[in-house]
Amino acid sequence: MRAVLIREPGDPDVLTLGQAPAPEPGPGQVLVRVRAAGINRGDIMQRRGKYPAPEGWPQDIPGLEYAGEVSALGAGARRWRAGDRVMGLVGGGGYAEYVAVHEDEAVAVPAGLSWEEAAAIPEAFITAHDALFTRLALQPEERLLVHAVGSGVGTAALQLARDAGAHVMGTSRSAWKLERAAELAPLEGVDTSTEDFVARALAWTGERGVDAVLELVGGDYVPRNVKALAVLGRLALVGLVAGARAELDLRAFMSRRLTLVGTVLRSRPLEQKIAAARAFAEHVEGRFEDGRLRPVVDRVFAMEEAPAAHRHVEEGQNFGKVVLRWA
């Protein structure tokens, strides 16, 4: 099969279109003919040699999500039939013509969506859904702070939270991204290139602080989030693009009974990934079809243009997801 390969760790030019052995579906698995795949920061880190794929997934083929049709069934697989349109998460190998996945981990592509739109859903929306509702237990009318609201996970979190009845403050370093985000759902936007999000969050809540924070940046944002949280506030750490280290005042956690949770989907055991996928599928059933939720596709590149697509994401100019597709 054709696949985008990492020749060696390095810049985007180490990505090349080549040949790789096609996977075989095992018991309970389905073989999916991939039509499109979303690009994620994890793919970029894997390309740089800083985020190896979990055991059992290809180290030289990036890609954490896919959309395509079922091509073959492994022994005992019964959830899907050949030709069904599915999407989902993988530990790696999404930039290939075929992936083999457990049948329960795959999710039906919502009716009316293109392959490119479907490929923009799994990593962004399942990550956001798991963080908001499983990790943070977000409730209607609560106030949520979402950092990097113009990212794939950020745009998904904004829509999911508003659909659930929460109020959202979103941050970005680009004013135009905040304007685009406001077209998806109402939000209180904060341009962090000119404004202090802590001061804005406290003013927005009458000095009470926000109930929850979805942290997609990391670094020095983390201790500042603590100052923005209300008593019994919760903080979910999802992304670390600004760094993996931060100094925290633990007294604030004790005195205000705060909660800090970290989450990552890629390295979880299969049964936990299945649980996250099925919870997402059940919660959002019908919401993409009727327009309450929608994938946000920034640009689509051909698979052979993977180096250019990675550069586009690394430059930070995308709003929502960048997607690769097979011709």
Image (cartoon, rainbow, N blue to C red):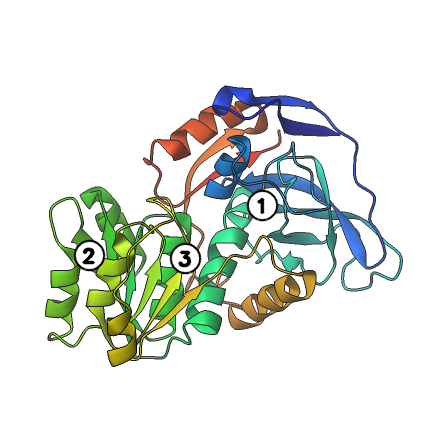
The residue furthest right is 75
Q: How far apart are marks 1 and 3 (CA)?
A: 17 Å
Percent position (x, y) of residue 246?
Answer: 31, 53
Residue positioned 69% across, 38% down in the render = 58
The kind of secondary structure element at disc 1 is loop
- Using the rendered view, name the quadrant where residue 236 is placed: bottom left
Q: Which of marks 2 and 1 is nearer the N terminus?
A: 1
Eye-nearest disc, 1 or 3: 1
Q: Nearer the viewer, residue 277 or 115?
A: 277
Disc 2 marks which residue?
A: 189
Residue positioned 46% across, 24% down in the render = 308
Q: Do the residues labelled 2 and 3 touch (CB within 8 Å)?
A: no
Percent position (x, y) of residue 124?
Answer: 47, 53
Dot label at residue 64: 1
Q: Do the residues labelled 1 and 3 touch (CB within 8 Å)?
A: no
The kind of secondary structure element at disc 2 is strand
Eye-nearest disc, 2 or 1: 1
Q: Which of marks 2 and 3 is nearer the N terminus?
A: 3
Amino acid at dot 3: Ala
Q: Does any portion of residue 187 appear in the rendered image?
A: no
Percent position (x, y) of residue 233?
Answer: 30, 75
- Characterize the local packing of mark 1: few (<14), some (14-19) or many (20 or more) Cα atoms within 10 angstroms: many
Disc 3 marks which residue?
A: 156
